[in-house]
Image (cartoon, rainbow, N blue to C red):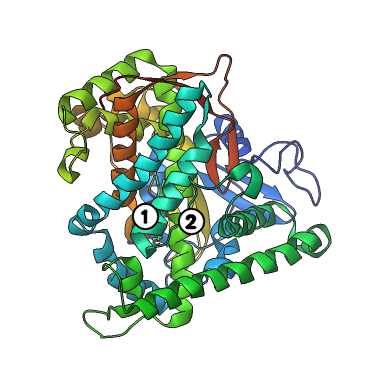
Amino acid sequence: HLERIPHPPRRLPVIGDALGSNVRTPVQDSMRIAARLGPIFRRKGFGKEIVFVWGADLAAEMADETRFAKHVGLGVANLRPMAGDGLFTAYNHEPNWQLAHDILAPGFSREAMAGYHALMLDVAGRLTDAWDASEAAGRAVDVPGDMTKLTLETIARTGFGYDFGSFERDFEREGPHPFVSAMVGALSFAQRRNVVPPLLTPVLLRGAQRRNAAHRAYLDRAVDEVIATRREAGGGPGDLLDRMLEVAHPETGERLAPENIRRQVITFLVAGHETTSGALSFALHHLAQDRAVLTRAQEEVDRVWGAVEVPAYEQVAKLRYVRRVLDEALRLWPTAPAYAREAVADTTLGGAHPMRRGAWALVLTAMLHRDPAAWGPHPEVFDPDRFTPQAVRARPAHVFKPFGTGARACIGRQFALHEALLTLGLLLRRYDIEPEPGYRLQISERLTLMPRGLRLRLTRRSPAT
Ligand code: HEM
């Protein structure tokens, strides 16, 4: 039932619409095609046809949980060898999804967040130590690199009591922590499998497949060690790992199996850092580009946090304007740039496109967030005031989806928001930031989006804070 859905005009045998597209930028290519073809379109490459949806009305329909559910396909399915039936990659019908969801959800409650606050502050302190040193030496800072260190340390320490020592590591001499190399290697492999035709995979990716097997074996070993250490210690501070190891389902009394725990640890380390790192990086980019926004954000932090040296848990969510800056950055650059939905029964999308049960489409979040029907005539303009309470009320529901939708939406949303707001608050209070002259935003794609090569110049605002 695809005839009514437009596709790029020059469609070739076998390679389909792949001509002129770049394997490194599948999301940005799709965004360009979306702008030409409208709110629903399809792309075909090497026999695979994918339907993309981004119109606000169609995306709202696909958010209806009585008609649609998460689809584990493409990028998400390629992570299965690594993350198995972990929370992010589990099929809806796999019993381990509900089990793990119910056991882990309390690990993301308000009380749990308040419990992570001190560790988050500690990690942020390592970041400001590193940035102070760069500032004193007159060096620009590598934003995506440093944000990735911050978010990886934060999830590893709050979730699992594990310290990668990212900030202390002599990167020039030692390179990244082997766990990080293995994780990044496995992720890039998953991304490449998205764009290499399956029949050619054994040929084109032979070496990569071998390296990937080694990376995965390393990850499993490392995670087993973290678990063994915790068991030997006889338990920890009640973090995610303790929940995984000790908590039984409140109703059934069932527990997570050891193999599943391995998958969950890897899932949380991966899902819990790249996207947040990108969100922080894009927010800092836009703050550095817009003096008026920067000043307003700094004034808010100064006002709300006042003279206290260390912000308390409750003071973080009070940064309302900084939160709008973060939301607006996630609008333009939703770092998880798409999510897939499948029909739970035969249905017709938009009154025009029949879908069989199980048929699926990708919601292209980065374009949904630019639909003029929801965001007005200038969706490319960065404007945090799109997220004032009045502006939010005036918009239809389901037009802002950086954390996905429905039962399978992001479990780590509050965690990410607290971590990002806390970090932005600390940085804004401490530094003036400026872009490097001539920097033009370029987006790199590795399952998630990231501002490539973003470096900022720092000036300390006040030595007292
Ligand atoms: C799911 C985005 C941070 C853990 C998702 C989904 C999105 C998303 C779009 C749904 C994917 C789908 O429908 O296929 C983001 C963004 C983040 C972020 C933009 C940061 C700005 C985090 C953090 C954690 C986390 C910090 C963990 C601490 C997860 C997990 C799932 C998920 C486990 C799967 C949930 C399930 O299916 O039950 N995230 N995420 N995320 N996220 Fe996040």
Q: Tell me where residue 8 appears, x and y as whole percent.
A: 67, 37
Circle 2 crowding by C-alpha within 10 Å: few under 14, some 14–19, many from 20:
some
The answer to whether residue 369 of the structure is visible from this angle is: no
Tell whether label 1 touches label 2 (CB within 8 Å): no
* Mark sitting on residue 164: 2
Three-letter code for the amino acid on which mark 2 is drawn? Phe
Residue 330 placement, left or right of 322: right
* Mark sitting on residue 410: 1
Dot 2 falls on a residue whose secondary structure is loop
The answer to whether residue 74 of the structure is visible from this angle is: yes
Indicate yes or no: mark 1 CB to ligand 1 under 8 Å: yes
Which residue is rendered at x = 60% and y = 62% of the image? 78
Which residue is rendered at x = 69% and y = 64% of the image? 212
Which residue is rendered at x = 73% and y = 54% of the image? 196
Q: Which tag, 2 or 1, sits closer to the chain's start? A: 2
Residue 244 placement, left or right of 320: right
- Name the quadrant containing residue 177: bottom right
How far apart are the two marked residues, 2 and 1, measured between alpha carbons?
24 Å
Q: State the residue in front, 450 or 30.
A: 450
Quarter of the image where ligand 1 sits: bottom left
Which residue is rendered at x = 43% and y = 58% of the image? 163
Three-letter code for the amino acid on which mark 1 is drawn? Cys
